[in-house]
Image (cartoon, coloured by chain):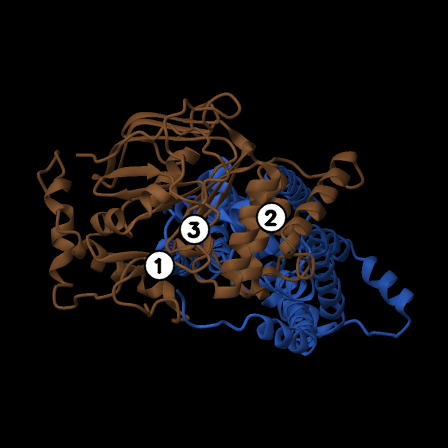
Chain colours: A blue, B brown
């Protein structure tokens, strides 16, 4: 909080000369690192988010992000970098959630019950860790709501490595994962390992959520993980275009958020979320307007005749 | 335990349509066609959750045949398909599919599971779902612009054309109607040119015109593409005129034969333990009528909610539960479930 308010006191002036503004902003190494880290995170979040929204696992994604908070605060408490805490807790939580079989009609219900339980308990643990730190953990707010200050070059490289690993693995399992998500019965009959894919996806999602948390904070991960993906899916039903659009929107929201946060006294988490949300609202409105006519004709052809022989 | 008998009519003559006289179909003729039956079961039995569904089933289905699997709910019709797919292992006996163990025939088997309807909010085009049938089980990312990608696109366009889904294949599949989704799913099952197509109640929850259209489509695929079709059906009438063979699962075993042999008033009444009449229409088609007429479930838009109760009623109607005593526990699996449905006797005929 202190860091943020320090910055707020010296908010740089926006000159409307775009080039000068960018040059001024990027003259600070911490801003350059913030843009690097933000871009990497946005790409991963955009891709993972697309699959997460398609698989209807947003709640699991949210939980994986939230457990980054006890992870980070616990890591700071024991004196290691928060980055490790994020990844350790998020991936461990992913494995716990994956341990519940998702098969059957009640699988989703079971999963959300367990997910909620894990989430509540670990959030409480995070609160305990910050209390144990005796109030010197000045970054509680930034852990929860995000910060772009103080991202080191080393952290950027950690994020790049994680992103590369996540994207490479996802590229390897992407097609069977899509098959398993959309059409599990047929996928299983074709020999696609549903359970292993589900676990692998949750672990990747945990890693993506941990990475995203470092920019948006653990509570606002949805800004990058859900909103761009949901926006993209409401705009196109083509997988390749949807993925590309999701990444594009996430990167755009991050860059806009970082820029505006730099030139305004308000925090980054708010701005990134606002831009992502704005995009989502616009896309939904456009899709609803465009879809109204299409739905009407579709429902006409789907009229059902009653009775049977 | 079993009332099955072996039907060795490998490939009855295609002229063996019901109504064309009591035909030669079903007469002993060593399994023929192209080098042995596509499906062969010997003394097969299956157990799900400790309950013996059927046992001692012998069955041969030859290449290019259109076979319907019929029977009351809960007798293991869908499980039979899963055994053929290799996702459920038989408890005993031998099962061969396309000359190999189930699950080993890979992409030569197309499968359409029971009653899938996609989430209306699912944002994926019908053609993408068909594409998943083509290479959805492969790892890695398809590279754009390769010969493989072009071949995939060509085949997908071809199969979408074959099922007549061209007009809506590019719409999100969740926004397609039930009949449209079913056609796209048949395209998905067909996209790898399977030799065997396993369809689980593909006509269920479709309206009458769509039932007829999808039945005609499946019949055409069977005839023109030479694909062996095994279709689990709830209502035999839409497909009856196209069938080469009927397999009835009931009483813990299977009865197989040509429609003319099996689809008779006496056989069906015995198997279903409820009055069932087989009538002949003026143009010679057979029609199966349950007692009494007019089931509610087809007019109900939320038909799937009734499935469980229907199953209770069907089990209740079968009085020979003693035959299904689980040898392991001595437990009669059906009787417990009957207790809570006793006061709701169901007058509906299963086949109607």
Which residue: 77% across, 41% down?
Answer: B144
- B254 relative to A66, above or below: above
The quarter of the picture where the C terminus of chain A appears is: bottom left
Left or right: residue B3 compared with residue A142: left
The quarter of the picture where the N terminus of chain A appears is: bottom right
Q: Nearer the viewer, residue A296 or A141?
A: A296
Which of the chains bears the disc numbered 2?
Answer: B
Q: Nearer the viewer, residue A46 or A117?
A: A46
- A47 relative to B222, above or below: below
Tell me the distance, in whole angstroms, between the alpha carbons under discs 3 and 2: 22 Å
Query: Which image quadrant for residue A238?
Result: bottom right
Q: Which residue is mark 3?
A: B240
- For label 3, the SS is helix
Q: Which residue is mark 1?
A: A113
* Local crowd size for mark 3, using a 10 Å CA cut-off: few (<14), some (14–19), many (≥20): many
- For label 2, the SS is helix
Which residue: 74% across, 62% down?
Answer: A252
Residue B150 on image: x %, y %? 77, 40
- For label 1, the SS is helix
Disc 3 vs disc 1: which is toward the camera?
3
């Amino acid at each position: 909080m202190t860091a943020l308010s320090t910055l707020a006191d010296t908010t740089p002036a926006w000159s409307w000369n775009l080039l000068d503004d960018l040059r001024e902003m990027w003259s600070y190494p911490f801003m350059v690192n913030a843009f690097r880290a933000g871009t990497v995170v946005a790409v991963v979040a955009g891709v993972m988010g697309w699959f997460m929204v398609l698989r209807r696992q947003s709640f699991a994604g949210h939980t994986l992000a939230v457990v980054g908070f006890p992870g980070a605060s616990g890591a700071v408490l024991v004196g290691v970098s928060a980055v490790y805490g994020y990844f350790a807790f998020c991936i461990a939580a992913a494995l716990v959630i994956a341990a519940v079989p998702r098969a059957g009609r009640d699988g989703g219900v079971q999963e959300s019950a367990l997910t909620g339980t894990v989430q509540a308990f670990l959030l409480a643990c995070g609160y305990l860790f910050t209390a144990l730190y005796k109030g010197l953990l000045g970054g509680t707010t930034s852990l929860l709501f995000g910060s772009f200050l103080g991202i080191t070059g080393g952290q950027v490289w950690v994020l790049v490595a994680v992103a590369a690993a996540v994207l490479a693995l996802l590229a390897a399992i992407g097609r069977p994962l899509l098959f398993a998500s959309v059409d599990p019965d047929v996928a299983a009959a074709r020999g696609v390992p549903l359970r292993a894919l589900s676990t692998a996806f949750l672990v990747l999602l945990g890693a993506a959520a941990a990475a995203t948390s470092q920019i948006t904070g653990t509570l606002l991960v949805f800004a990058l993980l859900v909103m761009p993906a949901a926006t993209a899916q409401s705009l196109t039903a083509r997988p390749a275009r949807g993925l590309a659009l999701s990444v594009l929107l996430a990167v755009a929201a991050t860059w806009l958020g970082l820029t505006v946060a730099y030139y305004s006294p308000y925090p980054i988490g708010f701005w990134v979320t606002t831009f992502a949300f704005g995009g989502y609202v616009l896309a939904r409105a456009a899709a609803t307007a465009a879809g109204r006519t299409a739905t009407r004709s579709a429902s006409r052809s789907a009229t059902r005749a009653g009775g049977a022989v | 335990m079993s009332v099955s008998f072996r039907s060795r009519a490998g490939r009855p003559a295609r002229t063996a349509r019901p109504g064309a006289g009591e035909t030669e179909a079903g007469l002993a003729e060593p399994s023929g066609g192209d080098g042995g039956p596509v499906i062969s079961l010997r003394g097969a039995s299956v157990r799900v959750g400790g309950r013996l569904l059927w046992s001692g089933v012998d069955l041969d289905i030859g290449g290019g045949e259109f076979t319907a699997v019929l029977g009351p709910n809960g007798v293991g019709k869908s499980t039979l398909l899963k055994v053929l797919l290799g996702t459920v292992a038989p408890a005993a006996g031998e099962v061969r599919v396309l000359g190999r163990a189930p699950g080993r025939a890979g992409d030569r088997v197309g499968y359409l599971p029971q009653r899938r309807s996609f989430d209306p909010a699912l944002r994926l085009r019908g053609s993408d779902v068909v594409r998943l049938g083509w290479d959805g089980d492969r790892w890695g990312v398809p590279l754009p612009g390769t010969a493989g990608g072009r071949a995939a696109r060509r085949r997908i366009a071809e199969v979408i054309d074959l099922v007549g889904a061209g007009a809506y294949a590019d719409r999100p599949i969740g926004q397609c109607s039930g009949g449209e989704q079913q056609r796209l799913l048949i395209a998905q099952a067909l996209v790898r040119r399977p030799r065997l197509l396993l369809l689980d109640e593909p006509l269920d929850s479709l309206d009458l015109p769509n039932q007829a259209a999808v039945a005609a489509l499946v019949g055409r695929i069977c005839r023109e593409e030479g694909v062996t079709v095994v279709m689990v059906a709830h209502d035999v009438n839409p497909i009856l005129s196209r069938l080469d063979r009927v397999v009835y699962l009931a009483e813990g075993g299977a009865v197989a034969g040509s429609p003319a042999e099996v689809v008779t008033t006496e056989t069906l009444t015995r198997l279903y333990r409820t009055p069932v009449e087989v009538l002949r229409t003026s143009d010679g088609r057979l029609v199966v009528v349950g007692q009494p007429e007019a089931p509610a479930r087809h007019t109900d838009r939320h038909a799937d909610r009734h499935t469980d109760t229907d199953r209770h009623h069907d089990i209740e109607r079968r009085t020979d539960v003693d035959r299904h005593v689980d040898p392991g526990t001595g437990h009669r699996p059906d009787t417990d479930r009957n207790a809570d449905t006793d006061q709701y006797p169901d007058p509906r005929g299963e086949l109607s």
